[in-house]
Structure formats: C-alpha cells, structure tokens
Amino acid sequence: MNSLQLRPDFTNSLPGESETDNYPRQVYKSVWSKTEPTPASTPTMVVHNESLMQALGIDAQDPKTAEIFTGSTLLENCLPYSMRYGGHQFGNWAGQLGDGRAISLGETIDTSGAHWTLQLKGAGPTPFSRQGDGYAVMRSSVREYMCAEAMHHLGIATTRSLTLCTTGENIARDIFYDGTVTMEQGAIVCRAAQSFVRFGNFEIHAASQEHELIKILADYVITRDFPHLGAPCADVYQQWFREVMQATATTVAHWQRVGFVHAVMNTDNMSILGHTIDYGPYGWLEEYDPRWTPNYVDNTMRRYSYGNQPEIARWNMYKLANALVPLFESTEPLEEVLAEYHDTFDSTWHQMLANKLGLANLQTTDKKLFENLWSTLSLTDTDFTIFFRQLSKIQPNTDQASVRTTLLPGFYKPDEYTNNIENGFIEWVTQWQQRIQNEDPDARIEKMHAANPKYVLRNYLALNAIEAAEGGDFDVMENIMQVLRNPYDDQPNAESYAARRPAWATSKPGCTMLTCSS
Ligand code: AMP
Ligand code: MG
C-alpha cells in the first residue's frame, strides 16, 4: 500500500491561473496552471528507485503505483499543475516556455524531513506545450532517468529519478529535424526534486512587468528552500542571490570535474537551487576537448561546449539578476554578487583540480601545473576519465616506461604516443611527480579516487541501455546503474564499463551527436 501523502504546497502558496481548460496559450499573472495529465492506455512501471520510493512511502508492488506515476490515477490531495516560465535560449530571449511536457503532482516530505516535488515528464500536453505534444519517448526518458541518478551518486546536486513507466502509446519523433519521422514508445519519468523553480520562472514575470509576482515567488523560494536566511528583506534578497550564485558555480565546477556537458544551459534549464536539471542532449567527455558538445544544433557556435560552461553559468546569473532588479532599490547589491562569480568559481574549481591531482594543499604555483595539464591532454585524443584514474597509479619515482604503460589505456590513438607527444606527457608528469614528492602516497591516492570517478555514464553506455529498453529489456540499464551507484570505487567485475569508447560508437548518432528531440 502506498502511504505517500501529497500536499499541494506550491499551488496553495502561489497564484495560479483561473482558466483550467488544457489548450496552448500565453498565460499571464500566474505562476502555474492547473493541468490534468493524459491517462496512459497501458501504464506499466519498468524501472524504479527502491530507496527513494521507500523514503517517500511508495510501494513498488502496489498495482496502483504505475497508474499514479503515469498520471492515469490521481492521488488524494493531488492538484496537478504545470509551471509558467520563460528563458534565454542560446543567448536570445525566447518568451514564454513553461512546462510543455512536465506536470507536477504536488509536494511531499520524506522520512528524513526533506522536501520533494514529484513531477511527471511526458504525461501529455499542458497550456505551455506550444507546438509540442507533451509526450516523451523511451530514448529520452532512459537518458534522463539514468543520468540524474548517476549525477546523484557522483555527489553532484541534481533532480532524482523515481520511476520509469511506459504508457503503451506510440509517439512520432523527427530525431534529426530532417523530416524523417519514426514512431517511438511513449514513456514517462517521474522525477523528484526539492524544487523545480528555474531562473526562467523569475524572468517571465520580469518580462511581463509582473513585479509583484517576482516578490511573491522569491519570498516563497527563500522561505521554503533557504529558511536559514530568515524573513525576506533587502539584505536577505542579496544573500539569497549570492547563495544561488555560489550553488550554481559549485555545480558547474563539479560538471567540469567529472567531464559532464549539459549541452542546453538555457536559463529555463537553470535550477534556482543550483541543481542539475533537464537532461536532454547531454554527454560525457571522452577525449578531452574544451570545444566538445554533443548537441547537434549547437555544432557551429558551440555555445554550450564543455569549456564554455563556467562562463555561460555567469551569463545566466546576469539574466537572473536582471529579472530580480525589482526586488532592490538599486542594482548595486546584484552587481556586487555578480562580481564575486569568478573568484567563487575559480576557488572551487582550483580546489577540485588540486583534489584531482592528489595535492594535499593548493599553492599559487599550481595554476601553471593546471594550465600545462590541459595543453598536455590536448596533444593526443586522451580519455578525460581514464587519464585521471590512471594517473593515481603513478608514483613520484615511476619511470618513463611505466608511465607509458599506465597511461596507454586512456589514449584513443595509442600509436601517437611517441616522440614529441610522449615527451610532452613526460614533461607534465615529471612536474607533477615533483609536486607530489613529499605527500603521503596512501592519502594522495585516496584523494584522487574520491575526486576522479572511475565510472561515468559514457555516451555509448546510455545508448546500449536505450536499445535494450526499446526491445523490452531493462537489465542492461539496471546493470549500468548498479555500477554507477559507486562511481569512485574500483569494481573488479565492471572493468568493461570503465573502458574507452568502443570504435563502433565513434560517429554513431545517439553517442556523439544528439538533439533536443525527446
Ligand atoms: P528543453 O529543451 O527540455 O529545455 O525544452 C524547452 C521547452 O520546450 C520547454 O518549455 C519544454 O517544456 C518544451 N518542450 C520540449 N519538448 C516538448 C514536447 N514534446 N511537447 C511540449 N513541449 C515540449
Ligand atoms: Mg527544459
């Protein structure tokens, strides 16, 4: 039996729309719109998150569970809603976007007292669906489910995945926007987060001159999610903005640490809590390349490439600041915080890099070591994840031949590791060996293992999981997720999950090239 209790906290606390019919429209003077999910023809739960379910009082065996998490049956006290937000997409104001294929069921508190909102992704159209159908397919749902959990187990703030259900519907998708339409299986992820409020929730009210709503929403977010700040007032608004900036910088620094490329850092995909949200055409760095993005539509500009993420986060903070101006008498408090972004990001990132390299402390001269590291990794196609993990096996006195055997598994073109390229690596490794000479080896290795995951959701692993899931086999997905629950541990039976991208995946769509089509 499910003991999950939903409380309509968001809808009770914030102004919603009086219109309750479900058709696409521009919405005004409202934070949310009442939105009934479209019942699924054959709701079937295919994957679930047992520990999170237990914490929330959900019984996976209860036959009603699949109906609840496809939106086919509504729990008592459930007032389903979609959220109104706007956003800057690829640098341009895009106007009203909103939850076009997401419907929140309500809020709840788990056994530890933590707040959650439960949200269905793909349960049918909403007032914000525009030309979209409001549905999601297996491919994108498996990607979202797996990556959010992988991120959580890496220790990075993120939305969580609760259930993956199939609906029994077939959905038409044009994956590469070239007119080739395929029918794909409908699927719904129920995701859970402390909050789904985005930068874009504030931006839409600013763009619509709804200044009162900016304050109402800010006060709600502060009271619910930043209670330690106390009652909202001018100083509290500034400190809140600072904490949003710090959380955002920290999360992006973690993305850089593990080689995660979000790929659609539009302001509507930026969580006000700094959590990773909206897993679309994301990818994980294979060969280190700061210009890499898996997002096919961003191929030319590469706005959301790996190396740009920290600056894009800052740009997005500017857009949020613009939206928050009505909370302040002058723009000074916002500008003051924005000016702190670089120092905040750099100090967090440099500390993470020190950890990645196993340095007991951070010294000013280490900046040079970091800079040289990036140019060294660029000498040949070097797997970002494998390189750092292998580096932890090198000691201050390891000789050149052993450095070579240790690093070789991380190179996509091992034949290139000769002459100048080998010399370049040896030069950097020697600098690093000198730097770690006096450090306790056990402590260093432990530090390096804790900062450098051995297992990440490699793009081809996600594709393997999708292809099996589309054939009705969820074991591949479950097996990968089992490994990704302990990403920093050596798992002797899971070596293959830590290996370089196989040759077949090098240019396969869905591995190296993705779109937002979901
Ligand atoms: P995203 O690329 O996930 O950040 O989505 C951008 C906007 O498009 C959001 O407002 C989504 O809700 C909306 N959207 C994306 N896919 C669909 C869909 N299949 N149906 C309706 N709206 C969608
Ligand atoms: Mg989105």
Image: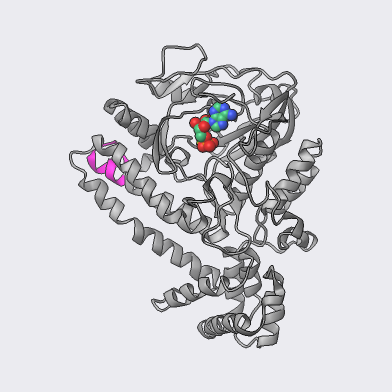
* Above-or-below relation of 135 to 273: above
Residue 72 % position (x, y):
66, 18
Residues 106 and 339: in front is 339
Is 495 positioned to the left or the right of 288 in the image? Answer: right
Q: Is residue 237 magenta?
A: yes
The main secondary structure of the magenta stretch is helix
Question: Residue at point 30% right, 46% down?
Answer: 239
- Residue stretch rendered in magenta on the structure: 230-239
- Residue 281: image quadrant is top right
Residue 370 % position (x, y):
48, 73
- Residue 52: image quadrant is top right
Q: Residue furthest left?
A: 329
Residues 420 and 206: in front is 420
Q: Is residue 114 visible?
A: no
Quadrant position of the N terminus in the picture? top right
Q: Is residue 435 magenta?
A: no
- Residue 132: image quadrant is top right
Residue 413 % position (x, y):
69, 71
Q: Is residue 356 visible?
A: yes
